[in-house]
């Protein structure tokens, strides 16, 4: 192999190495992606089943705002309730399903229908317009948020 061929081969090898070692640290984690999505929209509850009971109508007209600081508010223009929220990252089981690794904790400290939303929710489905939550330990509990 002549000198020029060796240089070209070396350039290709170095280029491949640089490209394959791209800075993945700049890619947002699944939790960061979910947080950006949740905090960039206002949400409404379109389905809530609590211990098998349909309770969606308790939240009709309310919109939910998930703040970057962990604050959560629910308002219908007349009544407002404050709570907190956070994303919990669970250890990976190696199956590469990012939704199984994330939970959303919602907490309202009021003694009314909003207290029913207080739970650590598993994320079962996520799209650009909808998030379906559930309780793995209780198949009779599910919560769906859709953005406004």
Image: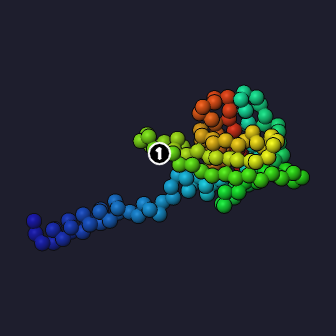
What residue is at 51 percent from the left and 45 percent from the top? 90
Question: Considering the image in quadrants, where does the N terminus appear?
Answer: bottom left
User: How many numbered marks are there?
Assistant: 1
Among the 4 quarters of the image, the one containing residue 20: bottom left
What residue is at 68 percent from the left and 32 percent from the top? 141
What residue is at 24 percent from the left and 69 percent from the top? 11
Among the 4 quarters of the image, the one containing residue 130: top right
- Asked whether the viewer can see residue 81, the reply is yes
Of 16 and 70, which appears nearest the observer?
A: 70
Residue most toward the left?
1
Coordinates of residue 58 in the picture (x, y in percent): 82, 39
* Residue to which mark 1 is pinned: 91
Coordinates of residue 88 in the picture (x, y in percent): 57, 49
Q: Residues within 10 Å of mark 1 (few under 14, many from 20)?
A: few
Q: Work out whether 70 lies above or below 117.
A: below
Disc 1 is placed on an element classified as loop
């Amino acid at each position: 192999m002549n000198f020029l061929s060796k240089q070209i081969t070396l350039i290709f090898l170095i280029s491949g190495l640089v490209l394959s070692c791209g800075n993945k640290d700049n890619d947002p984690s699944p939790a960061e992606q979910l947080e950006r999505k949740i905090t960039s929209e206002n949400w409404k509850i379109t389905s809530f089943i609590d211990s098998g009971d349909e309770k969606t109508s308790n939240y009709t007209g309310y919109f939910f705002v998930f703040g970057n600081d962990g604050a959560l508010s629910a308002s219908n223009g007349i009544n407002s309730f404050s709570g907190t929220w956070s994303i919990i990252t669970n250890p990976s089981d190696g199956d590469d399903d990012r939704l199984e690794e994330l939970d959303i904790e919602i907490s309202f400290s009021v003694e009314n229908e909003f207290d029913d939303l207080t739970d650590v929710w598993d994320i079962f489905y996520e799209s650009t317009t909808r998030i379906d939550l559930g309780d793995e330990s209780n198949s009779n509990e599910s919560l769906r948020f859709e953005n406004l």
